[in-house]
Amino acid sequence: MNIRANILLRVYLAFGLIVLFAFAVFLRLGQVQFVQGKKWKAMADSLSTRYVNVEATRGNIYSNDGSLLATSVPEYELRMDMYAGGIADDKVFNEKVDSLGLKLSQIFNDKTAKDYARMLRKGRQDSARYLLIHRKVGYADLKTIRTFPLYNIGKFSGGLIAVQQNKRILPFQALAARTIGYKNENVANGVGLEGAYKEYINGETGKRLMQRIAGGVYIPVNEEAEVAPKDGADIISTIDVNMQDLAQSALEKQLIAYDADHGAVIVMEVATGEIRAVANFSKVEEGVYKEKFNYAIAGNQDPGSTFKLASYMALLEDQLVDTNTMVGTGNYKIPGHMIKDSHGSIGVVTVKKAFEQSSNAAIAYLINNRYGENPKRFTDHLYNWHLNEKLELQIPGEAKPVIKNPSNRSWGKMTLPQMAYGYEMQLTPLKMLSFYNAVANNGKYIAPIFVKEVRRLGNPIEQFKARVINDKICSDVTLSKIKKMLEGVVTEGSGKQYVRNPLYKIAGKTGTAQVADANKGYKAKKQYQASFVGYFPADKPKYSMIVVINDPRGGYYGALVSGPVFREVADRIYASDMQMYNDMPTRLVGNTGNPPTKAGQSKATQKVYKSFGYKPLFASKSEYYNIIDTSAGAVYQENTERRGVMPNVAGMGLKDALYLLGNAGLKTKVAGSGKVISQSIAAGPKVGRGLGVQIELN
C-alpha cells in the first residue's frame, strides 16, 4: 500500500470515529431530553427550588378581664431585587437611587444617605437579586417605605421584597411574665402558658416556594405563600391584671425592704380554683428583683407552721383533741432533740390558743402523744388528702410533693413530731394554698387552674374547670372548728399585729421555717422562710392567698415579713370588689305628698324652692344638707362634711354626691340615674382613701 492510500485510510478511520462519537452524543442527548427528561428536570428543580415553612401568627393570651397579656405582631426583613422589571433600566435606577438612600437614612437613622446609596449601587453592580436592606421593620414603617422612590413603581416592579416574621410581645411587659412564659429555639417545649398550650397557640405552618439564585441565596418565587399558614387559637387565662400588679408591687417592695433572696405570692379564687395572680421574684443584685424561677409551683421546701392546719385537722377529725383541750407550750423533749417555741412558753393553754400562737412544742407533743404508737394513722390522713400528689397543673414545672410515711427508710423517732409543725417534708406554696382553699371552700379540695378557655376567631373551642381532688376533706364539725382557729390567728394570735383589718375578717396562719441547705442541711448558715396563708373575707370567703419570702434579713417571722404583704394585697382587692361588701340598708328619701326633691348644695336649692313658692324649713346654715319630707314642707337636715368619715349622700343628685365622695377620697361606682337611693357603705364610719363605694340612683 502506497503512502497516499495509507494516509487516506487513517483519515477516513478518524472521521468515522468522530461521526460515530457524535452520533453517540446526539443519541445520549435525545435519551436524556426525551426519555429521562422528567427525571432530570425534577432533580434540577429540587436543587434550585425548595419549600420552606411559613410560621403562623401565634394566638393571643388574654387575662380574665380581657386585657391582652401576650400577642404577635408582624415584623419584616426588607430585601431588594436590584434587577426587578420596573428598575431594569439603568437610567431609572440612577435617577432615583440617591433619593431612595436619603429616605432610608431618615427612617432607619443608622447610616448616612451616601452609605445607603453606595450600598444600593454596589448591589446593582453585583447583580444582587436579594440584597438585604434592613431587619426588624414594623408594619407602619413598611407602609411608609413602599412610598419611597423606586419602591413606589409597583408592588413587584420596584424590587422591594418584604419577608414577614412574627415577633412576640407582652403589652404589660414584666406583669405575670413567668406564668405567661415564652417559646424559643433553646427550650423545645416552651415555658408557662406559651409552652403548655403550644398546640393551640402555635397554629399550623404554611409553605412557601423559594428559588436559589447566584450566591446560593434563596428568594421567594411568589409574593404569597403557596400554602397559607393557619393562625393559632387564643388563650383566656384566669389572671387578673390588677391583682397581678398588686401582688408583684407588694412583694417586690417587701423583698427590697428585707433584702430577701426570693419570694412568691399567689391569689386564688376560692369557689372556682382560678389563679388570679402569681408573682415570683429572685434577687439578681442589690435592690433589684426579677422573675427567674416559678417558686409558686416548683419551689419545694419545708412549709413550717402553715402545715399545722393539717396536723390539727387530723387530731380534731379523729376526736383525739378538742379546741378546749389543754396543752403545754414552751418546750417538748424528744430523744436527741428539744423542740422549743421561739417566743417562749405561754403556759398551759387550750388547743385553740396554742394554734393561734403557733406553738411548735404543743403540736409536736399532741401528734407524737396521740399517734406515736400508730404513726401511719396520721400519715394516712395526709395521703387521703392527696398532699403527697401533684396538682396536675395546666402549666409545666410542678414539683412533686414529698410526704413521708413509716415505711420510708428515712423515717425515725424525730420524724413524726417534726412533721407535726411542717418539717421533714416538701410542699410547694401552691400546694399549701390549695389545702387552705379547701377549708375556705367548705371542705371541697380543688386543683387550681390558669386557663379557663381556648377560643378561635372569638368562638370557644374548649373550656376548663377546676378538677375536684376531694369532695370533703373533713367533717363539717371539724371544718367549723378549724375556721374559728384560723380566724383566731388574726384576731387574737400571731397575725393580729400585721394582718388584722377591722373593716373585714381575714383567716389564716403564719409560718416560719428554717430552710435546709442542699449540701449541709440545717447545720449551715441559718436561712428562714417566712410565710402567711389564708383567705378573706373570713365570713364569706372569695379569695385565698399565700405569701412566701425566703431568707429575709433583719427579721424572719411569718407575721412580720409576709403578713404585711398579705394585708396590703387583700386590702386593695377588698376595696375594689364591691361584691365582697356587706349589704347596707337602703335609705329612701321623700314621699309622694310633696314634689320630688334632691338633697345637695344649700344656697342653690333654697333659691329654686322659693321661686316655686315651696316652703322650706332650714334647720341649719351648713353648705350641704339631706331632706326630710314633712307635711309642713321640706326640712333640711345638716350634712357636715368630715374628712375620713363616710358622708351621707342619700337623696342627692349625682353631681353633689360625687363631689362629697371624691372629697372623702373614695372611688365611686354609679348605677342608675336620678337621685341617690342607696349607698354600699353606710354614713358615719371612718373610711380610708381609695376605698370603693357604689351608689344607686333612681
Image (spheres, rainbow, N blue to C red):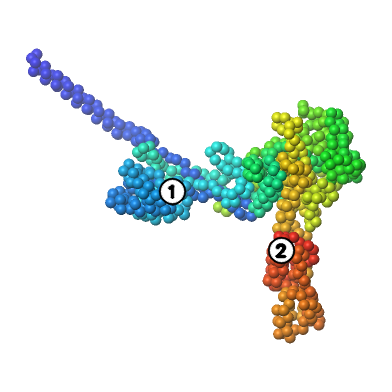
Pointer 1 with pointer 2, Cβ within 8 A:
no
Q: Secondary structure at mark 2?
A: loop
Residue 208 is left or right of residue 499, and the answer is: left
Residue at horizontal 86 percent and vertical 40 percent from the top: 344
As shown in the figure, which amino acid type bears the numbered disc 2?
A: Gly
| Residue extending farthest top | 1
Coordinates of residue 56 in the picture (x, y in percent): 50, 46
- How packed mark 2 is, by other alpha carbons closer than 10 Å (few <14, some 14-19, many 20 or more), is some
Residue 142 is left or right of residue 658, and the answer is: left
CA–CA distance between discs 1 and 2? 50 Å
403 vs 339, nearest the viewer: 339
Quadrant of the image for the N terminus?
top left
Residue at horizontal 79 percent and vertical 29 percent from the top: 411
Residue 175 visible to an observer of this rendering: yes
Quadrant of the image for the C terminus?
bottom right
Residue that label 1 marks: 110
As shown in the figure, which amino acid type bears the numbered disc 1?
A: Asp
389 vs 663, nearest the viewer: 663
Residue 587 is left or right of residue 141, and the answer is: right
Quadrant of residue 553 in the image? Answer: top right
Coordinates of residue 103 in the picture (x, y in percent): 39, 53
Residue at horizontal 77 percent and vertical 53 percent from the top: 537
Residue 321 is left or right of residue 223, and the answer is: right
Quadrant of residue 387 in the image? Answer: top right
User: Residue 665 got which mark?
Assistant: 2
